[in-house]
Image (tube, grey):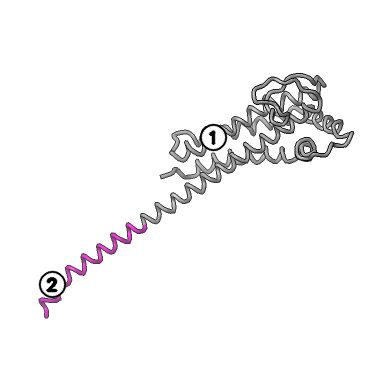
């Protein structure tokens, strides 16, 4: 039987809130990512300059902003630690897979997003950026030296990867909730049927004891 209770619900809350928070941030970047990845028409001439200004502004945000972001990341990790402490089979399957996706998102954030923002701010294009290779049409793991447009496309592709893996976390958590809910319903049904069977057996025994006494009176 799956574990339940307030502890599991609170841990799930710690996972879902940061994940939804990150998806909201990524959605706010979608208007900038769409012209780079999801349309065949060329962006307007001023688009790249506007995008660079936006990214530089993000990178130069006050220290409290990245600190809050990192706190949210660690809250999600703490939620996984709580749920995977003395795990049930459901925790191992769903939370284990969710943790893998969450760590992929953290790695992409560190290796692509943080590095990409620093490159855009410094203007040092032409350096290697790992990940997001699919957007550039190169094989995974190959070294590639990218320029200005390609660097911005890698950032956009990284945002897409982040969105996909974070949605995967939400789907797995929803799947775990559904599986545990179905399991709890099945257990409750079995217990109810067992109780009804015991009640019926008890009633049958009482009727059997009354029958001989009735015959004697007759």
- Give yes or no for residue 177 being in the magenta stretch: no
Quadrant location, the N terminus: top left
- Magenta-colored span: 192-218
User: What is the CA distance from the residue labelled 2 to the residue labelled 1?
Assistant: 64 Å
Q: Name the chief secondary structure element in magenta.
A: helix
Give how far across and how far down residue 130 sits, in percent. Answer: 68, 23
- Res 173 → quadrant: top right
Q: Residue at x 30, y 60 (%)?
A: 197
Give how far across and how far down residue 71 sits, in percent. Answer: 64, 31
- Res 77 → quadrant: top right
* Numbered tag placed on residue 212 in the rendering: 2
Q: Secondary structure at mark 1?
A: helix
Q: Secondary structure at mark 2?
A: helix
Q: Residue furthest bottom?
A: 218
Front residue of 78 and 55 = 55
Quadrant location, the C terminus: bottom left
Give how far across and how far down residue 85 sits, in percent. Answer: 47, 33
Front residue of 156 and 213 = 156
**Circle 1 is placed at which residue position?**
80
- Give yes or no for residue 210 being in the magenta stretch: yes
Q: Residue furthest right?
A: 45
């Amino acid at each position: 039987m799956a574990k339940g209770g307030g502890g599991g619900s609170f841990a799930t809350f710690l996972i879902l809130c940061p994940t939804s928070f990150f998806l909201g941030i990524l959605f706010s970047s979608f208007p900038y990512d769409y012209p780079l990845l999801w349309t065949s028409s060329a962006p307007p001439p001023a688009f790249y300059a506007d995008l660079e200004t936006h990214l530089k502004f993000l990178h130069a945000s006050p220290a409290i902003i990245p600190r809050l972001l990192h706190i949210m990341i660690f809250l999600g990790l703490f939620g996984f630690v709580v749920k995977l402490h003395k795990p049930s089979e459901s925790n191992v399957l769903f939370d284990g897979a969710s943790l893998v996706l969450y760590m992929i998102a953290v790695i992409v954030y560190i290796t692509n997003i943080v590095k990409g923002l620093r490159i855009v701010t410094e203007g040092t294009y032409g350096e290697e950026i790992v990940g997001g290779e699919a957007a550039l049409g190169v094989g995974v793991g190959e070294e590639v030296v990218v320029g200005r447009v390609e660097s911005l496309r890698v950032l956009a592709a990284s945002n897409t990867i982040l969105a996909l893996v974070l949605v995967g976390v939400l789907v797995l958590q929803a799947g775990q909730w559904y599986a545990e809910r179905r399991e709890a319903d099945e257990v409750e049904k079995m217990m109810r049927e067992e109780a009804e069977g015991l009640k019926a057996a008890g009633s049958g025994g009482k009727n059997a004891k009354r029958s001989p006494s009735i015959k004697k009176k007759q």
